[in-house]
Image (tube, rainbow, N blue to C red):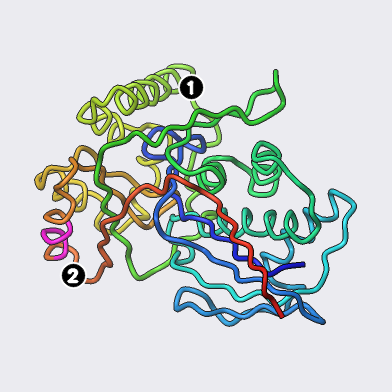
Amino acid sequence: MNGFTISVPASTANIGPGFDSVGMALNRYLTLHVQRSDEWVFEHRSEHLPPADAAQEHFIYQMAERMASECEAVLPPCKVVVESEIPLARGMGSSASAVVAGIELANQLCQLELTPEEKLEWATKFEGHPDNVAPALLGGLIVTAETKRTDKVEYFQTDDLNMDLVLYIPNFELKTETARKVLPETFSRADATAASGIGNVMIAGLLSGDYGLAGRMMEADLFHEPYRASLIPNYDEIRQAAREMGAFGTVISGAGPTMISFAPKGTGESIVKGMQAVLPNYSIELMEADRNGLRVEKFQDCK
């Protein structure tokens, strides 16, 4: 077995009314450097990661072992050096990136030859929903749906979005489980119809290039943002300030607490500078959409 590197992008999901179904890959990465070894060892090299667990307790190993077991394969022992630019529990898809990395680790080590569609099906099963794992795997903006008729994840992908992305990352965590507990269990037919219509118009705006319309629909979400807003400090202040600086729309990234603005191309740097004065304790970053998704680079010389 040759050594190899697995790289998986971060992601932002929901994007307003696209609850559990719309996500975009971001140019921040989880990277695994893998080489053969006499035993399983994980080593972390990132300020965003805690000390590495014992291999069998490591989340990425567990995902890899689960994938191998599903295919009746056995993982050979390796040393895995993990680097990450993705902060944990901030709404940037850190869990989804780790799920994808684990599946690809098994795919490479056990020569499973999984197709991208098969990886997506397994990642969705492991993660619970496709909105983060789909862009982490495939890159770009992806709209997903799980249908009973086909019993598979259907998706539409595009990387043709001409906007700047500004993220407001606080220095505290918000667990997805906590953010889900505030959501209603059911919606009335009238509320579901209104919320779905807002989501439909947002997607139409994004795909047609009417980003002003898309931004208004992002901020009109009825599925989750009204319920989660109270968990996000400075929620209204961030939205208002970003709007005044020219952003099309500002929403919670994933389950939060990070928020993200979609802004006219070329305005991101000025929004970053302006928002730093508004949010001095936040990390405010100008990002781009990752268009490639999961990447694997193999090496010939590995000892």
Q: Which residue is drawn at 21% across and 52% down?
A: 238
Which residue position is annotated with label 2? 280
Magenta-colored stretch includes residue 161 = no
Which residue position is annotated with label 1? 188
Which numbered marker is on residue 238? Answer: none
Residues rendered magenta in the picture: 272-276
Describe residue 116's horizontal placement relative to residue 144 as left or right.
right
Position in image of residue 277 (x %, y %): 11, 65
Which residue is nearer to you in this view: 230 or 203? 203
Describe residue 272's horizontal placement relative to residue 35 as left or right.
left
Does dot 1 land on a helix, a strand or a loop? loop
Which residue is nearer to you in this view: 31 or 232? 31
Label 1 crowd (10 A; few <14 / some 14-19 / many >=20) = few
Which residue is nearer to you in this view: 211 or 147? 211
Q: Which residue is drawn at 29% across and 31% down?
A: 220
Tell me which amino acid carries mark 2: Pro
Foreground tag (1 vs 2)? 2
Q: How far apart are marks 1 and 2 (CA)?
A: 41 Å
Principal secondary structure, stretch drawn in magenta: helix
Which residue is nearer to you in this view: 130 or 35? 35
Quadrant location of the N terminus in the rendered image? bottom right
Does dot 2 land on a helix, a strand or a loop? loop
